[in-house]
Image: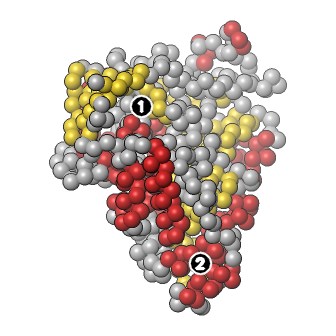
Amino acid sequence: MKKRVRFGFVLALVLVLLLAACSGNDEATTGEGGEASEGDKQGGTLVYGRGADSVGLDPINVTDGESIRVTHNIFETLLEYDQNLELQPKLATEYSSSEDGLTWTFKLREGVKFHDSTDFNAEAVVFNFDRWMDPKNPYHQGDFPYYPFLYGGFKGDENHLIEHVKATGDHELEIKLKRKTAPFLSYLAISMFGIASPAAIEKYGDTLNENPVGTGPFMFEEWSRNNTITLAKNPKYWMEGKPYLDKVIFQVIPENTARLNALQTGEIDLLDGMNATDTSIVEDTDGLELLKRPSFNIGYMAFNTEKAPFDNPLVRQAINMAVNKENIVDAFYNGLADPATSPLPPSLWSHDDSLEKYDYNVEEAKKLLKEAGFENGFKTKLHTMSNPRPYMPEPMKIAEAIQSDLAKVGIEAEIVSMEWATYLEDTKAGAHEMALYGWTGVMADPDNFLYPNLSQTNATVPAQNIAFYKSEEFTALITEARETIDQDKRIELYKQAQQLFQKDVPWLMLAYTTPPLAQMDYVEDFVPHPMSNDLLTDVYLSNK
């Protein structure tokens, strides 16, 4: 017997941002209800200003938000998360599971073409899975970081989750698992598992990273490194009449103030990443609109627990007491953040709000350092990214505040700053002692925050777990939670894991943020997604 779930057909985002009546732009022709007609939404180029370039454009080989925000508009996944973090159909229209929860059948959307005009079908999905999971596959080129820590390794590994992926019809797919996995459907909605054209994979090989071909609303056109990525409208997109924009240009402007100036002068149309203290400028400027991304992230400073003295938990506890986290939040987030206490954000189920906090206490921090054998402190380095992140709006200033607090307990921290791609490479290689970092969730499950960033499995180079936290007990707890279907049991396991995390303190907890964005008031129907994977299918410009 099979359990069957059918999706609805509403895919578009429904929030409409109305133009101010006093805008200097031409009014769009409207249909019933005052909404612009489909014809009047067509055309134009949106310039999306951001703080850093993408690392790559092959989704399976990236984990950073700057890459994902681009690839999410080029590639599509089988399922996707809507604004409310609910699973919705995308390339799969419905699914069913066997009674034991191991065999899943998916019906796939028909009439879909890749950007190279080849057909999307079940065989294309199988081709992608074969590439992802089999190290012997000729197109398995890169680290594929997300695959092993979701699916328990690669094909041939003892704990590999997947028994098989096969086409059972032109548009029907079967995936058989070796064991029950509670967040399995969520895996299929993660942007890293966007379905690429098999023909393009064969054609471009390891240069697919610079020649992405998917089924999404926009097609890749050009990449000028550390400057712009240009996407063009997919004229054969399966959503009739969409997208509305002719082009999207992702423009890199590293400095927050310069990016805001570019918005004010009309050089860009939409701004992501700004100083929290500049929100009042946007609110007070005619023609600009302030937006807020729903909070679904965490900002922190990771200790490299494999390097002395950070291999000593007393040192890590002392630093958690030495840094005035509340002052940092007050100074640099302008009311758009709360001090963090858990590696899970408060908006995510199983967040434990009963965790005992490490309050600011200089004298207690000194006592712990003395107990650890560092009465006179020590010298170290604090690594930081140079560009803003959703969870770290002013990284250099935050690093300087931490540096100042540490000096009060005798710790002399030299700040090392570098651009985003290099920063990721260095921290994943473990080149740091302490490093500012963060995470925006890509699926609405605690597994996504804990397993990538804190599991023993993911603490080998290139590591996403840049604390190199290798607690067998912690990894066992989150692994059991992953393989447990009962929701109440999962919550209990995750709470135990959070308690252990709080004891071991591999991170200095900083903030849960509500990142501010800004746009020109003629940008319509842009709705910031909690996961930062902003889909631009429904966006249009009312001044064209």
Question: In the image, 15: left or right of 76?
Answer: right
How far from the left and from the top, in percent, is residue 241?
50, 15
345 vs 293, nearest the viewer: 345
Q: Residues within 10 Å of mark 2 (few under 14, many from 20)?
A: many
- Residue 21's place in the image compared with 453, above or below, is above
- Identify the amino acid type marked 1: Leu
Q: Residue visible at 21% across and 47% down?
A: 155
Q: Which mark is residue 340?
A: none
How far from the left and from the top, in percent, is residue 323?
65, 72
- Identify the amino acid type marked 2: Ala
Question: In the image, 277: left or right of 390?
Answer: right
Q: Residue visible at 63% across and 66% down?
A: 357
Measure the C-alpha gap from mark 1 to mark 2.
Answer: 44 Å
Is residue 494 visible in the rendered structure shown here?
Answer: yes
Q: Which mark is residue 318?
A: 2
Question: In the image, 269: left or right of 381?
Answer: right
Quarter of the image that includes the C terminus = top right
For the residues carrying marks 1 and 2, which lies nearer the camera in this image?
2
Q: Residue visible at 44% across and 73% down?
A: 305
Q: Residue visible at 56% across and 62% down?
A: 300
Residue with the mark numbered 1: 79
How far from the left and from the top, in percent, is residue 215?
38, 27
